[in-house]
Amino acid sequence: MIPSIAILLTLATAALTPDRVAELVEQLDAPRLAQRQAAEAALIELGPAALEHLPEPEQTTSAETRLRLERVIAKLRAQATEGSIRPPEITVADVTVRPPAPSGEGGLLRVELKASWRAPPRIITLRQRMSNVRAIDARGRELSPANPRAVREVFVDRPAQTATLPIGFKLPAAPTDGEPGSGAEGGADSGHESNAEFPRLAELSGRMTVTWVAYPHTFRFERLPSDTTARQQVGEATVTLERFARVGEAYEARLRVKYAQPRGALASHRGWVFQNKAELLLPGDETVAPFETETYRQTGDEVGLAYRFRVEQLPAEAVLAYRLPTAIVAREVVYEIKDVEVPTPHD
């Protein structure tokens, strides 16, 4: 039986559709003041996920719509920060553990924490400090972590919805003569209790740190090609188009991505940032995906990516679109499981 703790993560999001957003935008210029105020409030209530469906204020013909749209966008961008992101709703299901390791492996009780979540959110990492996890056996004794200073971390480099964290505990010492559970099979040779004398955990609990990205937004850069730097900021994310120019037989776009609070999410071993979608939008609803991507810069809070596109002739109406989460969030997940059976090696 594979041990697991199932943790269901869901983010509360308001229902929205592009048609609903367009309807509310149209009402920003309604004849009655009450209608205009209600439409503005409704757009803000939709949350930052509505940002990608809103038109640019300068594209509107009505001064009233432009003014209210600017206020809506400013408030939604302000919401796309850590303090405004609702924490996930956590549900902890059952847990089982692997059989204790043989005495030759140090009397180790192996546990796997299995986290499951529904999309969204897009989980980047699960992190468990062993100092933040607690296991108590059926006799009320607390088990020591195999390595109390260890930090177990799993990286989710694809849009998965499950991840497993292995952790371990030292088995309690075998009871001495006269103590409950002592006897000929009390594990005197190994100094640890045998599996038969260690039938269950009374409690397994802890705090795990979950890091995820939220509120994707499509950044659009026009007037291509260009050697002029263009910068856009939404929420905690800043995207800078450093250059868009022909290089050999292709066009190269150099994009620099920076987060105000990256929380380690831009470390070189985390590939989520390379899965963000970049494409050229051409007239006639034609799209061109990059045939090659290269990293040209990597720091703790910033990454530079070069995207190369094959286009024979670049139309003046071409737009570079880049879809990116605008916030990185870290939260602690608290879990607690009672009465966990410990299977024998033959289970």
Image (spheres, helix red, strand yellow):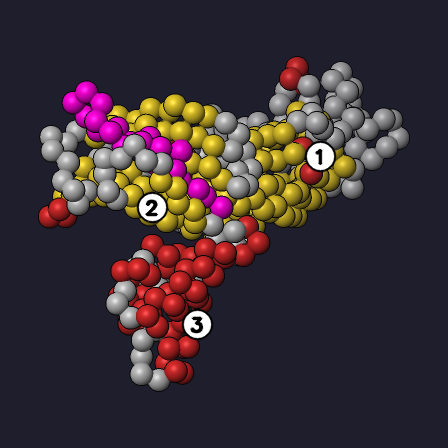
Which residue is at 51% across, 33% downward?
Answer: 301
Per the image, the residue denoted by label 2 is 219
Viewer-nearest of discs 1 and 3 = 3
Q: Is residue 155 visible?
A: no
Q: Nearer the viewer, mark 2 or mark 1?
A: 2
Quickly name the residue at label 3: 41
How far across and down, in percent of the image, does residue 275 sit?
Answer: 35, 35
**Crowdedness near tag 2: few (<14), some (14–19) or many (≥20) residues, C-alpha within 10 Å:** many
Is 48 above or below relative to 217? below
**Residue nearest the viewer, comparing 249 with 53:** 249
| First reached walking from the N terminus: tag 2 or tag 3 | 3
Compared to residue 260, the image places residue 185 above or below, namely: above
Q: Where residue 177 appears, x then y in whole percent?
A: 87, 26
x 50%, y 56%: residue? 78
Q: Secondary structure at mark 3?
A: helix
Q: Which comes before the other along the chain, label 1 or label 3?
A: 3
Q: Which mark is residue 131?
A: 1
Question: For the point 33% across and 47% down, which residue is it?
Answer: 218
Q: On screen, 101 above or below 214?
A: above
- Would you say the magenta stretch is mainly helix, strand or loop? strand
**Residue 141: image location, x then y, percent:** 78, 37
Circle 1 — which element? helix
Left or right, 159 with reference to 211 = left
- Residue range of the region highlighted in magenta in the rendering: 236-256
Mark 3, Cα crowd under 10 Å, few <14 / some 14-19 / many 20+, is some
**58 w.r.t. 344: above or below:** below
Question: Percent position (x, y) of residue 219?
Answer: 34, 46
Mark 2 / mark 1, whichever is N-terminal: 1
Amino acid beneath label 1: Ser
Label 2 secondary element: strand
Other-residue count near label 1 (Cα within 10 Å), few / some / many at <14 / 14–19 / ≥20: some
Magenta segment: does it hold 258? Answer: no
